[in-house]
Image (cartoon, rainbow, N blue to C red):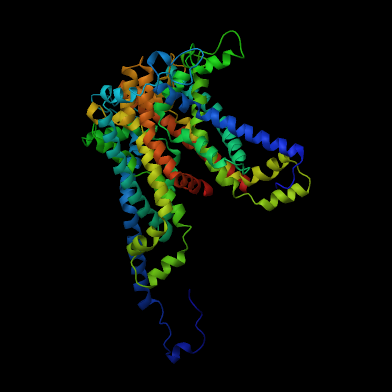
Amino acid sequence: MTARTSPFRRFGRVLLYVTMIVAAAGIMLPFAWMVISSLKLNNQVFTAPVQWIPDPVQWSNYIDIWVKADMVTWVRNTLVVSVAVTFLQVLTGSFAAYGFAKMRFPGRDVLFLLYIGTIAVPWQSYMIPQFQMLSSWGLNNTLWAIMLLQAFGAFGVFLMKQYYESIPDSLSEAARIDGLSEYGIWWRIIIPLSVPALASLTIITFVQTWNDYLGPLIYLRERPLWTIQLGLQSFIGEYNAEHALIMTGSVLSVLPIALIFLLGQRYFVQGIATTGVKG
Amino acid sequence: MTTPVVGNQRTLGFSQPEPSRPLRKPRTSLKVRNALIGWTFILPNFLGFAVLTLTPVITLFYMSLTNWNIFGTAEWVGLENFARLVGDKSFHIALGNTLYYAALHIPITIIVSLALALLLNQKLRGAAFFRTVAFFPYITSIVAVAVVWNMLFSPEFGPINQFLGMFVGGDLPGWTVSKDWAMPAVIIVGTWKDMGYYMLLFLAGLQTVPTELHEAARIDGAGAWQRFWNVTLPCLRPTMFFVTVMVTIQSLKVFDLILVMTDGGPGQATLVLSQYIYQKGFEQFQFGYASAIAVVLFLICILVTVVQFLYNKRRDA
């Protein structure tokens, strides 16, 4: 491919690079603005022309925010919910996926169709009956509601099933002949082989739960129960003139996710590709 | 599976696998056992799924036929709620805005994310970094993203209008505070946030396009554009179908983005169906009426998906 270096081709390559760099800069601009503004004095956020380098650098914003906002509580609640949801989703999702991918029994395919069908059903359409139901169980205004809301989604089952189907059946059959029970096959053969998919599902679920705004908005009324998204939104409402501090809070709410994403990016990308390939 | 019994075999009394009887029993019980084990695998997840998703979906239809409200009394009112929808101006606005959002967000997102995937597929140096960048908006929280964009869109001192002001004189768009520009602003942010996800799906799809086809087309003298149109796109059809279904549903249910960016405003300029459900249900506690709106959203989503499925099937055949 690189053998041919006609000037026209080379120009094309350069053009592609320019497009890529401009696109990348455009996409990242809001984040750059967010970080820069978070280090400014409040009256420096909106200036004409835009001041791209904060001067003086207000590191103190990152201290003030912990005093003005109840970040510790919010982060703690979000962590509790995210860890619980991720644990449940990965455990039950991979367990169910084994039934769908590696076992044959009547009703299996109809059941799976039911799971897939719900992809076309927006949560917004059944959030009211769901709210009524969870409220009648006394779970309104508890973190339990948020956990239940997210833990049994179809996505995990779907992702893990797609992956399990790529594991040859001969493996589980050999184990079966050796006398291993189905549960043993799942735990000893399939789970160790599906670590990449488990990692994908873990990361994706964790990030989704961390970022969820609507669930907490509907269920969590009391401040001590708020998650980071809900807290940040109320902080924005309360301190709507404190632009720099709002940006500081935004940076802090994005930071953990950014770190997780950068560390586990490979799994993220693979997980999404897995669900998309078959369609 | 009855093998034809030939001649005297029977009378000879050989140890034929004496028909089914003794064998069938263990086999059926094995089947039952197998089914039971299969169910135990699925049950933990299915219980949660059935209780938390299927049950509410079914009760939704019942609720939409009642006048359930804050006092918890649900009286059967038949189709009254739906009759009320016909004359509800706000509902018409919400429906129109939802379609407006979808009509722009669907094609723009598909085109942009496909373009990004094609760019990434050129094996340029730094492509891995670019992939990270393009995907990053998708994993960041809507609240943080919305507040940043609102500042960027700020009509007087926001960087976007400052930038535009360098090229265009006169009136600049008021973005989120203007009735005409609020929806385009929301669509821009929606596309910016979602395109990385669909880009990854397209990128995975592009890996399935056989390189031999491209080589053959190149030898036949097809230009880059022709190769894209006649080789890449047809090979991408399964991915395109999946992406279209996903982005359509995502557009029709758009909610949190609008809630935190414009709260449906100014006025009702960006009020969408999901938010109208929320307003009626959780702000005015008209659960019955809100459920009727939700049924409409539900039916639109199902209908659109079914149509897309049928269309895809017909083209497959």
Q: Is residue A78 above or below residue A247?
A: below
Q: Which residue occupies the foreground of this view, B313 or A185?
A: A185
Residue sitting at 67 percent across and 35 percent down?
A: A14
Q: Quadrant of residue B29?
A: bottom left
- The answer to which of A149 and B132 lies nearer the viewer is B132
Any part of residue A145 in sight = yes
Quick one: which residue is furthest to the right in this view? B221
**A133 left or right of B169?**
left
Residue A107 shows in the view? no
Q: Position of residue B226 (x, y in %)?
A: 73, 40
Q: Residue furthest front?
A: A56
The image quarter containing residue A78 is: top left
**The furthest residue to the bottom:** B12
Q: Is residue B122 above or below residue A192?
A: above
Q: Which quarter of the picture shows residue A126?
A: top left
Residue A198 position, x and y percent, is 39, 51
The outermost residue toward the left is A138
Rendered location of residue A132, percent (x, y): 27, 32
Tally of marks: 0
Q: Position of residue A127 (x, y in %)?
A: 34, 33
